[in-house]
Image (cartoon, coloured by chain):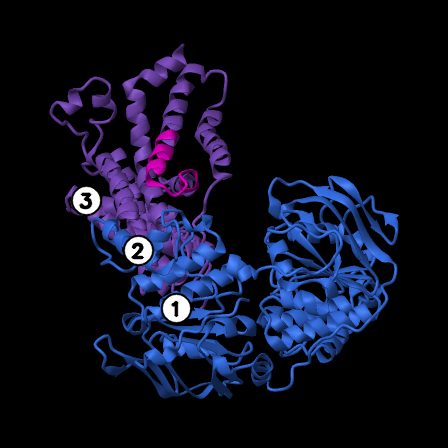
Chain colours: A blue, B purple
Amino acid sequence: MSSAAHISPETSHDLLLSLAGVTKRFGALVANDAIDLTVHKGEIVALLGENGAGKTTLMNILFGHYVADEGTVTVARRDGGLEQLEPGAPQAALDAGIGMVHQHFTLAENLTGLDNIVLGTEPIFRLRRDRTKARAKLNELMAGSGLNVDLDQPVHKLTVGEKQRVEILKALYRDARLLVLDEPTAVLTPQEADSLFAILRKLAATGLAVIIIAHKLAEVLAVSHRIAVLRGGAKVGEMKTTDADHNSIAEMMVGREVPVSRRTAREPGKPVITLNDVTIDRGDSRRSLHGVSITAREGEILGIAGVSGNGQAALAQLIAGLDKPDSGSVEIFGDKIEKFDAHTFAQNGIARIPEDRHHDGMVGSMTVAENIAIEDVRSPEYQKFGFLDFDAIRKRAEHAITDYDVRCPGPDAPARLLSGGNIQKLILARVLEKSPRLILANQPSRGLDVGAQSEVHRRLLEARQGGSAVILISEDLDELLTISDQIAVIHVGHITPAMPTDAIDRSELGLMMAGQKAAPHAPHATKTTNPGETA
Amino acid sequence: MEIIDILLAASFWEAAIRIATPLIFGVLGALVCERAGVLNLGIEGIFTAGAMAGWMAVWLGAGLWGGILVAALAGGFFGLIHAILTVPLGLSQHVSGIGVTLLATSLSYFTYRTALPDVSSPPRIEPFRPLDIPFLSDLPFIGQALFSQTAMTMLALVLVFVTGWVLYRTPLGLAIRAVGDNPSSVEAQGLSVYALRIGAVVVGSSFMALGGAFLTMSAFDAFFFGMINGRGWVCIALTVFASWRPGKALIGALLFGAFDAFQVRLQTEVGAFLPSQVFLMMPYILSIIALIVVARKADYPKALLVPWFKGQR
């Protein structure tokens, strides 16, 4: 993350929004506990907190989706006076100039960007639509902010970053004075995130107030002026970003010291899986590999760094046995694999932590216990006279819940009720309890909060210590540099030779991920420019 | 070449357009509902209700256009039932739709039998007459094929244009297309998902009822049991064929009408060799083939069949 040139918010002290003593209870649970928060014109405020800290509830109150039990929301009128926002009325929030960009975009994919923006802004019963005026206003907004998008493309043809721009334009088109972004970078590549931050700073300089809901610390430090931290529904701290430091905020968010995962020296063992000059050509770079040779060894974490969509999916499919190479060979423990199917690979001790944990990692309508046993239903351990032995399955689930601290109502709760972090713990429990020889971890900590993230790292390092090989596919440089022993970079289906992590320069790695720099043959660090500046 | 002769005859195209008319109403109705994200399998029953209500209004003394209005209101009523069950209550659209079909069909038969307990042959009304438009109706070929149809056929053709205009040229149409793809997009912009969906289903159902009314008030002059005969279901398939576009809906309905008119004529030519049922099957088989070819690429409204609840994302 590039460091921000901080625009001082002190230049403008106009109060725009003030939350005072906002409290919201759901039964016995206090989701928001007397929260005070103020936002001024031209200020970027980061609202930090782990999942379940109450960030989303607070924003839902601001938007009128929920009504607070106590407390008030005051907004500055456009003429400068203050007024209380009508509770429980989304339209009132829109009228007051509050715009929201949700984590899951609220765009109709079959319509163009322009149509999505104009939707609902003109009287609905009319014989014609006036797009000329809208287009003129939008061109002005795009020129002023740098939010450039082709507005005549149907939204489904836009990239994620472009869709997000359409969302921001939607708010600006309605003359928003306060923009709330919920986890804006969760879906972006590091380059896209940098360019988003540049735009936000530019917008803030013109007087727009911004609230960013986030749990990634580094980027919050890069973009915000002020940081407010929520934990367990209460505001536990607030500080200027210039006074903040990484570790103290992490502790404030989690409420205890966050264990920093460290690799301990360990000699790698024999190769578990070896790819020799593997090519899979599926036409597009997302699903293709070209002449890939990598080796994962026992007791070693091999990091595969890359911007998503560069062939990681193809690599993951191959290592899980779900696809076979067009040319080249795959060896597991030195034996050449002839039969490519998931069962064979699983029999050889290959376990996977899938990229999309909700979609590929579990079955939402099945219980926690069933999800833990789902990959082993053929094992005699879970069978009795050919039928599933639910007592044994439940017993194992109870162990997993305690050992891996999966927070859920119990083994019989449907898995879809679990939060993302707890689903990942459930998957870890399923994968690691089998003592796999190779763990294929695809973006294992994406979207997780600090606590859950450090738990994932700890478990992977533990598995490495126990002699498992780990292939870690990730686009999070911090994660890769912290826990990998070696790192290879994937770019448009090509993978560089693995380089020892200790010899890698961070900015050089960023350039290689962007395809702007070839891999050095002899791994050694050279100083180059920061990727954030070139992007 | 008898087949060429059949296809070139103005009477063939006249029949094709006449057969297509109720389908045009039905497909447009289904399309409006589905564009808003609601599958309306009540269509078969709503056809029946429209046929019965329109006919009975005229039989009781209302004018023909009065009958059309009554049919549309009846359709809207059953549409409202379906809309309430599936939109705010979020019940299964399949189950509710089939329920509405059963309810509307039975209610129509019940009303008919209650009003006319003793008749053996259905009483007749004076239906819409073929138009006689000065000049236009005298044109060669097209005068007979198109401009000598009844007023309801003209209404159907106008409705194709109006539906297309509303969907693609007005703010209302924009909102309907958006709500069928991602209801959250509509809510985030301050519009009501429920109002849009309920409105679309009610209006779409009125269109469907007009298709039924055409049968009793224009094609025939009486109401009898089983007269809808699967036309509603054909419309559901034609909607997919049309990729949810009014223009293509017109083409699909005409194509089906042409198949049907063609098979009747073919029966008289080669009927001696094949049982008549084979010919009756033809339009359906051909529509299935056309559907397979077209629908593989069909771009469904993404929120179709997906209930949406306020406050849920």
Q: Position of residue B149 (x, y in %)?
A: 22, 29
Q: Which residue is mark 1?
A: A100
Q: Which residue is mark 3?
A: B58
Image point (17%, 29%), residue name:
B131
- In this view, the residue in front, A252 or A339, is A252
- In this view, the residue in front, A186 or B103, is A186
Which of the 4 quarters of the picture holds residue A10? bottom left
Q: Position of residue A1 (x, y in %)?
A: 55, 67
Side (left or right) of A356 relative to B239: right
Side (left or right) of A471 relative to A288: right
Q: Which residue is mark 2?
A: A138
Quarter placement of the N terminus of chain B: top left
Amino acid type at mark 1: Met
- Mark 1: few/some/many CA within 10 Å (<14, 14-19, 20+): many
Read off the magenta span: B239-255
Q: Position of residue B29 (x, y in %)?
A: 33, 46
Q: Is residue B257 above or below residue A460?
A: above
Q: Is residue A319 above or below residue A22?
A: above
- Residue lying farthest to the top in this orientation: B1
Tag 3 near tag 1, CB within 8 Å: no
Q: Is residue A421 a member of the stretch shown in magenta? A: no
